[in-house]
Every structure is written in C-alpha cells, then in structure tokens.
C-alpha cells in the first residue's frame, strides 16, 4: 500500500465519518426497536443475525490489530489500517447497542491470539501478505452483509446491513487499489 | 427430521442443479468471496471449519459452539441438505444462526461441489 497517497487518506477522512456512522446507525437502529418489539419472532431472528455480524466485526478488529502490531505495515499504510479498524469498532458499538435494545446478549470477542491462529497470521511475512488478508476479509464481510439482507424481519435493519456492506466494500476497494489489482471485469461483483 | 425440514429439502431438490454439472473450481472462488467472511476450511471462526462438512452430521465440527437448533437437527450435509441450507437456512433449521443466503442455484451447486471435493467425497 505504498501507493496509498495523502489524497487517499484525506478521502478516507472525508468519506469514512466513523463517528457519524456510529451515531446515525445507533439512531436508526433505535428507531427499529418499536417495530421489532411488535414482531417478537422476527426480532429474535434479527438478534441472531446481528450477533453473527458482531462476531464478524470482532474478528475484523482483531485482524487489524494483529496487522497493525505485526511490524510489517509502514506508514501511511499503518494509519489506514488503524482508520479501517476504527470503522469496525464503530460497527461493533452500533451492533452491540442494537442487540441490547432488542433484548439480546451480544457475543463476546475472541482474543487477538485466537483470531491470529484461526487466520494463520503466522504465515504473514510482508506488508502485501497483510493487505491480501485484509482484502479477503473485507470482501467476505461485504458479501456476508449482503447475503443476510433477505433474512431480516425488519427492513430498517436490512438497510443498515446494506450500509455496513458498503463500508466493507469501500475498504476492499482501497485495499485493492493499494495492491494494484485490476477493477472487477463484470458488474455485480459483490453479493449473492 | 421434522416436516418443515423435509419440505425445505423437497422444495430445494425440486430445482437443484445437476451435481455432475457443478464447477468446483468456480465453487472455490465463490467460497472464498461469499463464505470467507465467516468460514475457513480448517479453522473455526464466526462459523465452523468446513473441511469434511460434506457427509458430516450437522452440529458436529469439533470445538465449535453451535446453536441448539443445528445440534439437534439430525441433518447430514449432502447435496440436497446443503442446497436447502444455502437457499434459506432458517427454513431448513429454524433457530439457526447463519442466515446467509446464496440466491443463484448454479452458485450453490458450485459451492457444494467445492465443499464435497474438500471433504474427499
């Protein structure tokens, strides 16, 4: 990601708005609370989906932590990784708040060491290796958020899932540019 | 296996793509991009490890904490059950925690072909 320029970084800062996302997501999700309460069965299902999403965000936070402390990332790449991690923390906070509002219990995070083992972080030897892992996880996360949209009982939560997916897709795009990957040849390259 | 589960499998198998025509190589690409956010072949992550899933009883991957619904489903993963699962997990096993759907039947068939290959079946 040596090609991540200052312009990219400024774009991140303009586009990311991590605090804005967190606040607005929580506000939007809070608005779903009454709807969810009126449909108890689907609310329980929605809590399950949100908890799976929370597990994914926990893992992303740990993955970026492992990458950031690996000694393999140089500035400005390191700053970008920390910025992306902050987005995932905002997602995590919004999901936890919503799960609690809906009466659920948020899943706990695994330790960074557990996540590192599961992701075979010991095999990471270069900055490119770290970026490839992040790129793969971000694409998987974007697709996961798209793939659960039809399962939500509450359409407002489905919309939030789409917003989360676009954040992950934005991360994937930046990482792909940094790795100098070609643009996707076909349309509709995300989602099922 | 309850009536709801059987119905889900029957509906799924009615439109299932011919397994012989499925493309495991394409399934690998799909697996990595669609399933890789939560799953790996050899490690439990948000979801269980998948190597060996084809032919395995649901809820029995070692050291993974499953929902009670999956553990008690009695399902064995094969062409029809995996297709029904990827079509709509909640219809197959109410109370499960995955909820991720793959809408295109050809994509489901290719992912299943890859999982079967990686399970040595």
Image (cartoon, rainbow, N blue to C red):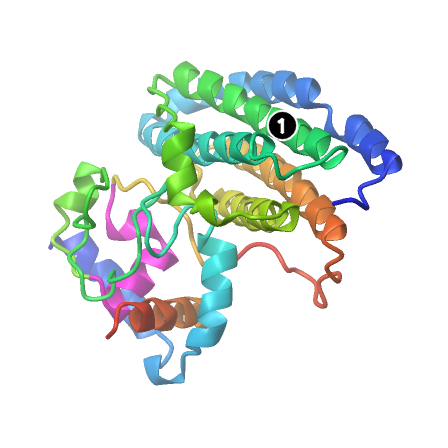
Q: Main secondary structure of the magenta part?
A: helix
Can residue B104 be spotted in the picture? Answer: no
Q: Residue at x 43, y 45 (%)?
A: A119
Q: Is residue A96 above or below residue A15?
A: above
* Location of residue A145 in the rendering, given as x and y in whole percent from the top left corner: 52, 42
**In the structure shown, which secondary structural element does the residue marked by tag 1 occupy?**
helix
Q: Quadrant of the N terminus of chain B?
A: bottom left
Observer-nearest of B95 and A108: A108
**Image location (x, y in percent) of residue B86:** 36, 58
Asked if the magenta segment contains residue B66, the reply would be: no
Judged from this view, the residue extending furthest toward the bottom is: B20
Residue at label 1? A87
Range drawn in magenta? B77-94
- Look at 62% across and 35% down and name the residue there: A163
Rendered-image quadrant of the C terminus of chain B:
bottom left
Residue B82 appears left or right of A173: left
Q: Quadrant of residue B16?
A: bottom left
Name the residue at 45% across, 36% down.
A56
Q: Residue visible at 33% across and 19% down?
A: A105
Classed neighbour count for the residue bearing mark 1: other residues with Cα under 10 Å, few (<14), some (14–19), many (≥20): many
Position of residue B15 measured from the top left corner of the image (x, y, whole percent): 36, 73
């Amino acid at each position: 990601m040596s090609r991540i320029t200052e312009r990219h970084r400024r774009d991140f800062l303009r586009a990311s708005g991590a605090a804005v996302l967190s606040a607005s997501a929580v506000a939007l999700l809070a608005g779903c609370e009454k709807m969810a309460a009126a449909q108890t069965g689907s609310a329980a299902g929605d809590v399950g989906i949100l908890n799976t999403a929370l597990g994914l965000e926990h893992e992303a936070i740990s993955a970026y932590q492992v990458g950031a402390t690996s000694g393999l990332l140089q500035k400005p790449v390191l700053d970008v990784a920390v910025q992306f991690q902050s987005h995932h923390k905002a997602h995590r906070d919004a999901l936890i708040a919503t799960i609690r509002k809906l009466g659920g219990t948020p899943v706990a995070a695994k330790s960074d060491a557990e996540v590192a083992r599961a992701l075979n972080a010991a095999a990471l030897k270069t900055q490119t290796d770290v970026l490839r892992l992040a790129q793969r996880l971000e694409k998987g996360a974007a697709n996961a958020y798209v793939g659960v949209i039809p399962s939500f009982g509450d359409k407002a939560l489905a919309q939030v899932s789409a917003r989360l997916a676009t954040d992950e897709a934005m991360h994937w795009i930046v990482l792909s540019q940094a790795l100098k990957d070609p643009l996707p040849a076909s349309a509709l390259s995300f989602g099922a | 296996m309850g009536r709801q589960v059987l119905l889900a499998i029957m509906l799924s198998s009615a439109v299932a793509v011919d397994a012989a025509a499925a493309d495991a190589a394409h399934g690998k690409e799909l697996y990595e991009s669609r399933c890789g956010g939560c799953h790996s072949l050899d490690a439990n992550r948000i979801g269980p490890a998948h190597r060996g899933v084809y032919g395995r009883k649901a809820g029995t991957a070692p050291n993974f904490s499953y929902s009670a619904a999956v553990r008690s489903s009695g399902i064995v993963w094969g062409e029809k059950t995996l297709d029904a699962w990827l079509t709509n997990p909640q219809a197959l096993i109410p109370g499960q925690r995955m909820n991720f759907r793959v809408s295109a039947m050809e994509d489901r068939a290719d992912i299943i072909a890859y999982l079967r290959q990686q399970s040595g079946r």
